Image (cartoon, grey):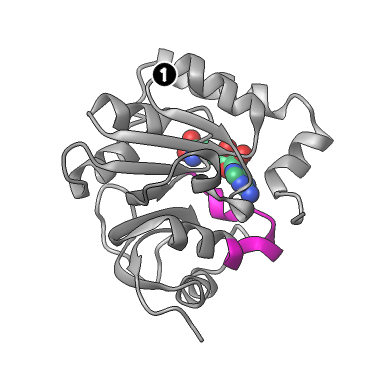
Amino acid sequence: MVEQSLWMQKVAADPGHSQWYIERFREMARAGQDLGGEARFVDALASRGARILDAGCGPGRVAGQLAAAGHDVVGVDVDPELIEAAGQDHPGPRYLVADLAELDLPARGVAEPFDVIVSAGNVMTFVAPSTRVEVLRRLRAHCADDGRTVIGFGADRDYEFGQFLEDAATAGFATDLLLGTWDLKPFTDDSDFLVAVLRPGQREA
Ligand SMILES: C[S@@+](CC[C@H](N)C(=O)[O-])C[C@H]1O[C@@H](n2cnc3c(N)ncnc32)[C@H](O)[C@@H]1O
C-alpha cells in the first residue's frame, strides 16, 4: 500500500469534491471555453496513431481529445467517480482506476509501452508527496525508450520546480525541454507554470 493521494484525501474530507470537479468542466465546456490546449500540445509532438497514456486523466478532457485525433489512448486515474464521468463525457480511450504510485499496466492487460505520456492539470501536486519519485519511476517504466513524457503543473503548490526536476532525474528521466505554458511560452525564472518534456535517460544506480 502507498500513502493515499492528496486528491483522495480531499475527496474523503469532502465527498462532493469529485462531482464538483466534473460539473466544473462540464460547465466550462458548455460555455464554449477552450479546454484543448494540453491535447493540442501532445498531438503536435506525437506521431499519427500514437500510443498515449493520460496519467491522472480525471474526467477525460485531454484523453478524449487525443482519442478523437486518432491516437490509441489509455486514461488512468485514482478517483473512480472521475473515471466514470470520463467514460460518459469523453468516450474513446480505455479508462482504468489506479494509483499512479502503483501503476502496472502490463498486469492489467496493457502490455505495450507508450509513445507519449501526458500528465496535465497539476496531477503531480495531487499525488502523495511520499510517492512522487515512485510515480515518476512508474511513468518512466511505462514510457517507450524513444518516447516522451510531458508533465505540467503550477507554482506555489508545495512542489518546487527544481525538486521536481531532481525527482524526475532520480526516476530515470532526462529533460528535453522546459516551457512555461502549454501554448509554448518559454520557461523563465518568473514562470508560474512548468511544462516539462522528459525522455527516458539513465536511471540512478
Ligand atoms: C486537478 S485534476 C486534473 C485532471 C486532468 N488531468 C485534467 O487536466 O483535467 C488532478 C487529478 O489527479 C488525479 N490524481 C491525483 N493523485 C493521483 C494518483 N496518485 N494516481 C492517479 N491519479 C491521481 C486526481 O484523481 C485528479 O483527477
Q: Is residue 45 visible?
A: yes
Q: Quadrant of residue 101?
A: bottom right
51 relative to 170 in the view: left or right: left
Vertical placement of 83 versus 116: above or below? above
Quadrant where the N terminus is found in the figure: bottom right
In the displayed structure image, the side of residue 107 where residue 11 appears, left or right: right
Q: Residues within 10 Å of mark 1 (few under 14, many from 20)?
A: some
Classify mark 1: helix, strand or loop: loop
Kind of residue at disc 1:
Pro
Q: Position of residue 125 (x, y in %)?
A: 59, 54
Residue drawn 71% across and 49% down? 6
Magenta stretch?
121-134
Who's the residue at 42% across and 20% down the image? 90
Q: Position of residue 102 (x, y in %)?
A: 63, 53
Q: Is residue 126 visible?
A: no
Looking at the image, which residue is at 30% across and 42% down? Answer: 51
- Say which of 105 and 100 sits in front: 105
Q: Nearer the viewer, residue 155 or 134?
A: 134
Is residue 111 toward the left or the right of residue 144 in the image?
Answer: right
91 versus 72 height, above or below: above
Q: Residue furthest right?
A: 13
The residue drawn where x is 49% and y is 39% is 109
Q: Which quadrant of the render holds ligand 1?
A: top right
User: Is 146 situated above or below 51?
Assistant: below
Residue bearing the label numbered 1? 91
Q: Position of residue 68 (x, y in %)?
A: 27, 24
The quarter of the picture where residue 3 lies is bottom right
